[in-house]
Image: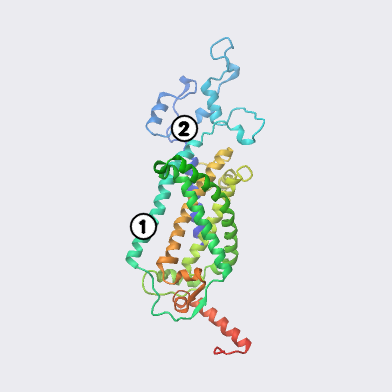
Amino acid sequence: MPRLIFAFVLTLTLSMMAALVGQAQETATPAPDRSATGGAQTLEDILARQRGETVDSQFRSSATGNPDAAAAITQQLGTLGGQSDPELWRALRYNSADLRVSAGGPVAGVLVQDGGMSWLTFRAGPLRQYGGWLLLGTIGLLAVFFLLRGRIRIDGTKTGHTVTRFEFVERMAHWTLAGSFILLGLTGLLTLFGRVAIQPYLGKDVNSLLLIGSKWVHNSVSWAFMLALVTVFVMWVAHNIPNKWDLVWIRQFGGIIGKKHPPAKKFNAGQKVIFWSVILFGASISVSGLSLLFPFEMPLFAKTFAILNDLGLPQWAGYDPLPTVLAPQEEMQLAQLWHAIVAFVLMAIIIAHIYIGTLGMEGAYDAMGSGEVDEAWAHQHHSIWLEEVQQKERDKLASSGATPAE
């Protein structure tokens, strides 16, 4: 299962990064003859861009003037030493101008950041659209499933005897992780959708207040999320290693579809998918979040792209090598988009997890509520684990010399 999750993350990484950084890829058509324009764009370039076709802009980023061939200062266009105003702004746009700043660090040397519009367009378009549909689609599918399947009930009657499913420390770690993630998800959605879902109806002042509060809550609660993530991993990783019973659980659809109840230890195959999704996606969200909090100390993508290029993965997927020189703003833009994309995927998974743990299955909430579950529920969903717990109780009584009646 971790291999499948890793393959999914890697595929998502390549596809999304290619979509973000591959917008200026060269087309298969030969480059037009620009000799008559001195290397500047032609009418064909302009018309192709208006038709929505991809135009190689390399000629724009490298088309700077030649100071040696410049006209005298007394002649036309001589004041810039061979460079016209468009060429100067082009150098600023593509970060090739010779700039010197006395303060502000690396970010102050970037006066015009060309990738900003690509980031804004992706954030306002595909990110909102597909992310929103993913969450709404997940809720819709769960609603349809509930109408068709109904609630998964306990077969027969409850025994009245309970067994401890999760200790207090386990429940505290779980609820800390769950509560912080819900707050992070809500504040992240407010930040992304506030301008289109709140501002038109409640006004700019209300939206501004919500965004300021969301930013503060998001940055503060993130530390609790990361601490709880590490705690949950340490406590439960040993119980989430795949075993042969997971194949039986998958083959019988976990008893969710049909009437069979496959045996399982403390965590079944479905819960293991949830666990590893939370750990892997949560770790990725945490790392990209730290990069956003400390953008100059933790740049991620230039180094990551270099490793991927060395492995040949972009070329293997049919893409050009990824850029390995990124401005600080580009690092932050890529980190923000990756942060949001992975968060959307994890939110959809958690919505399904919440459904099963509350409305979808009778008795499931007790496991994380009081920590005690009825033996009938435990036998139906985690029979191997129940037998192990009961055997430990019998061994404990035997070692103390007591009998079950005592």
**At which x and y percent is residue 185?**
49, 53
Q: Is residue 289 above or below residue 356?
A: above
Q: Is residue 63 in sight in this rendering?
A: no
Residue at position x 43%, y 61% in the image: 352
Q: Is residue 162 above or below residue 279?
A: below
Q: Are marks 1 and 2 in contact (CB under 8 Å)?
A: no
Residue at position x 48%, y 66% in the image: 271
Q: Which colouring convention does the figure follow?
A: rainbow
Between 133 and 160, the residue placed more toward the observer is: 160
Residue type pointed to by label 2: Asp
Q: Which mark is residue 380?
A: none
Residue at position x 46%, y 49% in the image: 189
Q: Secondary structure at mark 1?
A: helix
Q: Quadrant of the C terminus?
A: bottom right
Residue type pointed to by label 1: Gly
Q: Which mark is residue 140?
A: 1
Crowd rating for badge 2 (residues with CA inside 10 Å; few <14, some 14–19, many 20+): some
Q: Is residue 361 in sight in this rendering?
A: yes
The answer to which quarter of the image holds residue 172 is bottom right
User: Could you tell which of marks 1 and 2 lies nearer the N-terminus?
Assistant: 2
Residue placed furthest toward the left: 148
Residue at position x 38%, y 30% in the image: 50
**At which x and y percent is residue 385?**
51, 76
Residue underneath mark 2: 56
